[in-house]
Image (cartoon, rainbow, N blue to C red):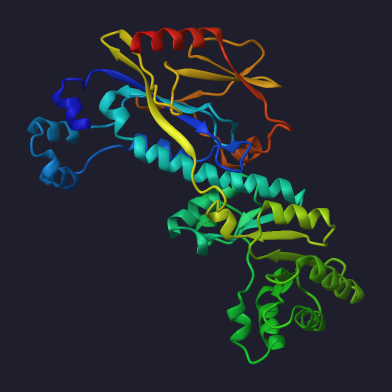
Amino acid sequence: MAAGYFAAGKTAELATFEFMLRRLPRNRDYLVVAGLPQIVDYLLNLSFEAAEIEYLRGLPQFGAADPDFFEYLRGLKFTGDLFAVPEGTVLYAGEPILTLRAPIIEAQIPETYLLSAITFQSLIASKASRMVRAAEGRPVVEFGTRRAHTPDAGVLGARAAYIGGCAGTSNTLAGFRYGLPVFGTAAHSWTMAFAGESEAFRQLQKLLGERTVYLVDTYDTLAGTRRAIALGEPFWGVRLDSGDFLTLTREVRTLLDGAGLRHAKIMISGDLDEHRIAELVAAGAPIDSFGVGTELATSADAPSMGAVYKLVEIDVAGMKRYTMKLSPDKQTMPGPKQIFRLTDRDVITRSGECVPKAEALLKPVIIGGQLVQDLPSLEQSRERARRVPSMTPRIEHSTELLALDEQTRGSVQ
């Protein structure tokens, strides 16, 4: 497409694309946006190296491409504008996540990266938010890297999970790279590596002291708990990774309290999602924290998201043409937009409109290829993600936007 735009003489045309949430993922009633720093880094460093250009030149698809196109790529960088909702913002179906305006080639090339970076992290952040809300104040720790689709996905997933409200991660690379709190316990292999469970626990306590978390279900959960108790303090608590959590946590709590270890905590892990967490909390299970892996790191019940990156406006030498898609079930609205948030509703308007006493969510991030504001810190994004309304607000469209939609639709038809 970039080579085609170049051949058609469209390099000077300014294109406005909108990254929009067409529909919410399955089993979701809101989305927590995450992934903006990765997008900003990509755009600010967009370029082609000589080896990459030579590779493209050698592809049969580019056999008819203008040789000057490859020289154009040598000097390519992003010179456009990016407007985006702050990371951690809660959004709903039909709302734009970001708007990108740039010469058409600069605006078209980033499409795949933008969709991937935002979609994946937003799915994980949203899943984490749901789990944290279900836990009702009990810490939820991200344990999912071993189940993530790639090691890199595990690191970014841990970051997104923290934005969504998780207390931290077991991924130390994510902790190092992003400053996340790190947590973890020994695996079953640790226990099995010793001749007896008591010796395994003793060696772990020797290393970790008051931070020791005994994984007590390798052989028999209650027997393992008794062996941990027999070693005495210091230790943090125990973790259960299997079995009937409601029954077992009550029995383990009884054992710990009976030994005078009321401060000792119980963590559970193993195929947990927000529904199972909510059931255990509602049943009064004496659980102090949750470790969640597969369901979180893969957003297992909703692994994809109906987000799209669509052209909404073309500017040719100051003459604007609004664009839209009319395909059944995939229609878009023309023109760049803004979201205004009120207490009971979101209003989607044409860019440049104003709604009194409302927060404008799409904010300038890059203007003319230059970063114009510092991105929110992880803690700020995490705090913003906590602002999930108690009920889904209704979505309205301004009169100006509806009029533009009708006008554009008529001109297309």
- Residue at point 61% right, 37% down? 380
In the rendered structure, the answer to whether residue 356 lies left or right of residue 285 reads left
In the rendered structure, the answer to whether residue 293 lies left or right of residue 410 reads right
**Place of residue 389 in the rendered image (x, y in percent of width and height, measured from the top left):** 70, 31
Nearer to the camera, 176 or 154? 154
In the rendered structure, the answer to whether residue 67 lies left or right of residue 284 reads left
Is residue 353 among what the camera can see? Answer: yes
In which quadrant is the N terminus drawn?
top left
**Place of residue 330 in the rendered image (x, y in percent of width and height, measured from the top left):** 43, 28
Quarter residue 102 falls in: top left
Is residue 78 among what the camera can see? Answer: no
- Residue at point 67% right, 73% down? 208
Quarter residue 370 falls in: top left
Vertical side of 41 occupied by 185: above or below: below
Quarter residue 286 falls in: bottom right
**Place of residue 8 in the rendered image (x, y in percent of width and height, measured from the top left):** 16, 22
In which quadrant is the C terminus drawn?
top left
Vertical side of 249 occupied by 87: above or below: above
**Place of residue 369 in the rendered image (x, y in percent of width and height, measured from the top left):** 35, 27
